[in-house]
Amino acid sequence: MNSSNFTVAITCLICSPVTLASHMASTSLSTNSSSSISTESAVPLQAGAWSIGVRYEEQQFDRLSDDSLLNLADADPDADLHSVESVKTTLFNISYGINENFSLSLSLPFVERNDIRAPHFHEEDNEFEIEQEGDSSGIGDTKLHGLWRFTQGDNHSTSLIFGISAPTGKDDDTSPEGELYEQEFQPGSGSWDPFVGVAHSRGLGRVGLDASTTYNFVSKGSQETNLGDWMTYNVGLSYLLNSNPELNWRVVVEANGLWRDELNQNGEKERNAGGHWLNIAPGIVAGRDNWSVFVNVAFPVVNEPGGNQDEQDYRIQIGFQFGL
C-alpha cells in the first residue's frame, strides 16, 4: 500500500457520536486512504486489505459566563440553557477492502463532556442559580459505513458514501447527584440514523485534493428527543514535501463545515440548538508504506450557534492509521 495514498481520513464529524449544538462530538467518518486528515476520501482500500486506526479529538469552547447564563434565564425562564467546557472523543476504527471499488468501515467512539453548567430555578430563593452538573462520559454510537467508487480516472476518483449510526452508546448517564443528564449530554443518542454523501479525490503530482459532503437523517432517540439532522461539507488540499520511502511528510490545509438543525423534544423545537460552523484546519501527516500519523488544529471562521450557546474556540486532532 503506497504511503502517498495511505494517510488518515477521520473527520469530527462526523461522527461518530452526535450531540446537540456547538457541543457536538466528532462528526468524522473514519476511513482509509486520503491525502487529507478530516475530509472523506473517495479512494477505497485495496481489495483484501485491512486498516485500523485511533483518533483523539478535543473541542474547546468559548463559554457563556455564569452572569450571562443567569441573565438569559431571567429574561426567558423556559429557555434550555447550558455551558460545556470541552468535548473529548477517542474514536476507534476498522476498515476492509471488499474489492477494488468498495470498502466497509466500522467505528466506535468514547465521548466525554467536561464541566457541564446550567441555571436552575430554586423556589426557596425565588431565583436562578448556576449548578455544576459534572462530566458526562461513555461509549458512543457505532457507525457502519460503505464507500463505493463509481467513477475512476488516471488521477481522480468519485465515490458514494452511505451507512447508518446504530444506538449502541450509553444513554442513561447521570450527574454526581444521580440526576439523569438531558439527551444532548449523553454519549449515545438512542436513535438509528442513516446517512448518505459523496466524495471526490484528485491527485496532481505532489498535490492532493479531497472534497466530501454527507447528510445525516436523525430519528427520535432516547428521552423522546430528536437531536436534529446535520450535514457536513469538507475540502482538503495537501502537498507532499518529500518522496522518501522511509518517511513521507505531507502538509494539509482543510475547510470543514457543519450545519445542524434544531433539537426537537416531545414535539417542541429547542431555540438554543443547532447552528452553522466552518473551520480552517492546518495540519501535517507523516507516513510510509502501511502506517501514518497526523495532527491538525482547527479554528472557526464561521461560528454561528443557534440561539444562546457556547461558541467554538478551537479543535485539535491527533491519531494514527495502520494497514494490514
Image: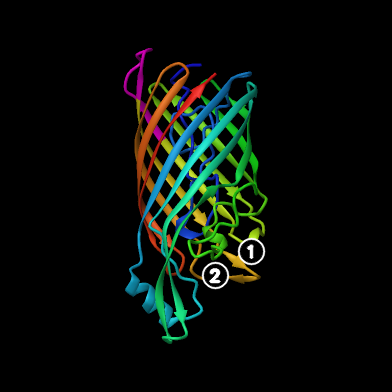
Quarter residue 64 falls in = bottom left
Residue 172 is at least partly visible in this image:
yes
For the residue marked with disc 1, what is the amino acid? Answer: Gln
Quarter residue 147 falls in = top right
Q: Earlier in the sequence, mark 1 or mark 2?
A: 1
Residue at 39% in and 62% down: 310
Q: Nearer the viewer, residue 201 or 45?
A: 45
Q: Nearer the viewer, residue 127 or 228?
A: 127
Query: At numbered mark 2, what does the secondary structure look like: helix, strand or loop?
Result: loop
Count of all numbered marks drawn on residues in the image: 2
- Image coordinates of residue 89 in percent, x first then y, are 47, 45
Residue at 48% in and 61% down: 176
Question: Disc 2 marks which residue?
Answer: 270
Q: Looking at the figure, which quarter contains the C terminus?
A: top right
- Image coordinates of residue 214 in percent, x first then y, are 57, 45
Q: Nearer the viewer, residue 236 or 67?
A: 67
| 25 over 4 or under it: above or below | below
- Image coordinates of residue 113 in percent, x first then y, are 45, 54
Magenta residues, as a range? 237-249
Residue 27 is at least partly visible in this image:
no
Mark 2 and mark 1 in contact (Cβ < 8 Å)? no
Q: Residue 243 colored magenta?
A: yes
Please, which residue is most extreme toward the top here? Answer: 245
Query: At numbered mark 1, what does the secondary structure look like: helix, strand or loop?
Result: helix
Q: Nearer the viewer, residue 21 or 282?
A: 21
Label 1, label 2: how far apart the Cα atoms are:
14 Å
| 59 over 147 or under it: above or below | below
For the residue marked with disc 2, what is the amino acid? Answer: Glu
Question: Disc 1 marks which residue?
Answer: 223
